[in-house]
Amino acid sequence: MNTKIIYTTLLCFLLPFIGFNQGSVLIKNGTILTVTKGTLQNADIFIEKGKITNIGKNLKVPAGTKTVDATGMFVMPGIIDAHSHIAIDAVNEATSPNTADVNVGDALNPLDVAIYRALAGGVTISHAMHGSANAIGGQCETIKHRYGVVNPEELRMVGAPRTIKFALGENPVRVHGEGNKIAPATRMGVEQVFRQAFSEAKLYMKAWDDYKKGLILNSPMYNRRLETIADILKGNIIIHCHSYRADEILMLMNVLKDFGIEKICFQHVNEGFKVAPELAAFGASASVFSDWWAYKFEVYYSTAYNAAILTRNGVVTSINSDSDELIRHLYLEAAKTQRYGDLNDDEALALITINPAKQLGIDHRVGSIEVGKEGDIAIFDKHPLSVYTIPQMTIVDGIIRFDINNDAPDMRLDVNPEDKFASDYLEEALLKEDNCLQGVSEWLLQSDHASYLRFIYSQRHSH
Amino acid sequence: MLYKIQKFSKILILFCVALTQNMSAQQIKKAEAGPFLLKNGTIHSITNGNFIADVLIQGDKIVSVGKNIVTPSNTQEIDCTGKHIYPGFIDGGTRLGLAEIESISVTNDFQELGDFIPHMKALTAINPNSVSIPVTRVNGVTTVFSKPERSTFPGTGALIDLFGYTPEQMYAGAEGVMMTFPSTGRRGRFDRRSDEDIKKDSEKAMQKINDIWTKAKLYATIDSALAVEKKPKSFYNPQMDALLPVVRKEAKLFIEVNKKDDIELAVKWVKENGIRAVFTGVAEGSRVTSLLKENNIEVITGPVLRVPGRGSAPFDESYRNASEMVKAGILVAIRTNDAENVRNLPFNAAYAASFGLGIEEALKCITINPAKIFGVDKTYGSIEQGKTANLFISNGDPFELKTRIEYLFIRGWNVPMESRHTLLYDEFIERNPGK
């Protein structure tokens, strides 16, 4: 009897993770842009319990299988955003140049309507990142856009590799050097934050080794911050580093070489095109904006041709949003590489599918339409690289999470009639606060409403 | 000996030319003057449909559109067979030329101190050498309205062409006094004011603009009286002077207002004061289309690519906004409200096109409609004989990303398709030395 209760309780607890979020669906007769294996005309995709089990013409499926008619439509892998801040309640733990101990995965917010709006742009996975206030920021979380779930745990893409945010240049220098009057105040100081962290983590690892071997009697003090840095040294965490200028990108690669660290994706990396051969040689990848530039000095000498130059130099490149707005039309942002640099359709689509999947270490599971991969799909009425395309349906793990023909005007999950904030209008300038410095502004100026507003206005782009 | 010197100097000159070219790697090549005959292109005239014809550009004007045009002897011909000719796009609201790097305040000139400063003139501070200008125009945007913003009366905006070496050369013949309508409601979750305080603040804000307007009317009366008596003014009030044309209904007032409740208040306010109003922003215009139409409000809306202001709004509210207003019969122009990325204007229009507006109407929203709103439709906004030669030649639909814009003409100048972005591409696509 007791065991039965225990099992039932366990089952109730585990159910959400084992089945409720996986569905079966047949997508019929679409133009399938697999990204990795060419384009298939008038073909079907069968997703069974969340996984793609068959691709081909006139697939036979069990009676009663949910069917989506994609005749005349374009079917592509769910779009992946390697840099975003949606679905999290906190962005910056801006209290130290090194906050490797914190994790934005502890602040997931499944009720954020931005998740739905991203789905309405075909995005099925995003990399919920810590901000750029600190040279070594917090750990990030790769999430699936299962809008409709209310348990934060159900947003996680279980099994995705751990990632951490690093940041170079103006932001960490402004927050700590200018704001807190502590190092780093320059790019020289930023380098030493990394060297110190990695060196101390090595000593920490050695101390634990010595203790385990019985060479020392007392165990070292457990330190979550050093544990995290040690995991980077062991190759268990992928670094995603906010960066802009060519020199600082080279600096970090030099530091990583000295410590034998290989897994690095440079974020924003507006001047990546200037050191594309070096990035390719190191094996570093790059996640860039399609065309954002000039919002601060360190992106003044950059170009919208960045993604194309990086791609042509053999750097695995993705286009990200870092914004509640851009995440809604990453397919447009990818298409811009055809205006700025003549990338072909497969190259352009790879920027928002298989390439970000590689950068997040999940390319064996998502990022292309292949048998065995997860059932994350976006369906468009026109080719997704046409400016006139409109996403029609977005499927996550075989479950339809966005359907333009079944789209209620108000898609919030947390409608509370008592909440006077819920229906409030947000000024355009304030919308642009969703970025890598989010949270810092409030923290710096929370007491002064007027200067807060001014600050936000002045920080329209502070990625 | 002389021969040798001549030869040497020739080499020297060649060397110098080569050197200069090298040194100017970060600068845009010079524009070229006409006359130009654009032969046999598909003309998207905007006002007279689409047809295949020739266009003769002479001086700063389109002097002829048609077939078998008689051309001056020095005319350069450009074969446009299979190509498309569009009028230059006009962005109805930007900070281009006023903002260089928005996070560095000293490079920004769109927000002077003071809340009532309509006499601050954007044209004074337009930087003709802004790096963002070439970046913008190579996407077909040839004319923009650049404006001061954010305080209640932040100044006077100016319509400028995106080619020229002085603000005067760029000036496109229209200015407009800007106003930011008070935002009366709660400003978001961080806004911790009580309901009562919000109401009080709103009343205070309305009181302030009413006071200004009462004074402005009085000032206009005094000004007129002095003019009748031919007496010089014994006072200096540039703020009130700047408002005179608006108070006298000779000029429109450009009012930034976005959310529904504010738009309703603003309509009431301009009606009471008999103001010829253009509303800008108008993010929630689709919620009050009949009110705007009934009161003959013209609208410059955008960006289209923005998140809806409310969590409760449908995901495509901003995409559909322009379309809803156009369908209601409102004169609508589209803007980016940007500085360095005004080049995205065509893509903003394209999204509006997809979400209900249609391509033809979307094109109007960035050509003839803004020209009408700014009162320059006799010279701007379409391809017609006598209009300013602002146009471009593309190999397809300029909204599509795969399309190339091949030639760009601003005021009759053939402007090179170069910008910092293309020059960096040329230099770095195959970096030398490489690794």
Image (cartoon, coloured by chain):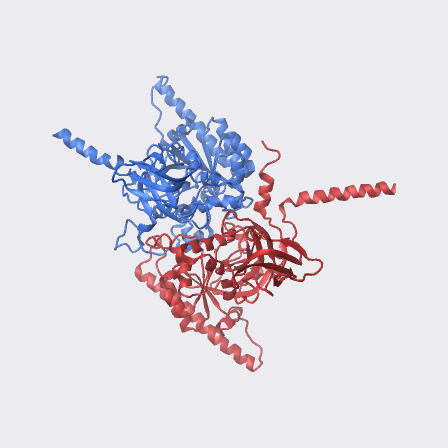
Residue at image coords 50%, 46%: A291
Residue A235 vertical placement versus B54 (above, below): above
Residue ranking furthest to the front: A58
- Residue B151 percent coordinates (x, y): 46, 61
Give the chain coloured red.
B
Residue B309 vertical placement versus A155 (above, below): below
Residue at image coords 47%, 76%: B218
Please indicate, yes or no, whether residue A62 appears anywhere in the rendered image: yes
Residue ranking furthest to the bottom: B229
What is the tally of numbered marks visible in this picture? Answer: 0
In the rendered image, the quadrant that contains the N terminus of chain A is top left
Give the chain coloured blue.
A
User: Left or right: where does residue A137 sit relative to residue B197?
Assistant: right
The quarter of the displayed image where residue B289 is located? bottom left
Residue ranking furthest to the right: B1
- Residue A454 percent coordinates (x, y): 44, 54
Choose between B67 and B413: the one closer to the eye: B67
Choose between A359 and B255: the one closer to the eye: A359
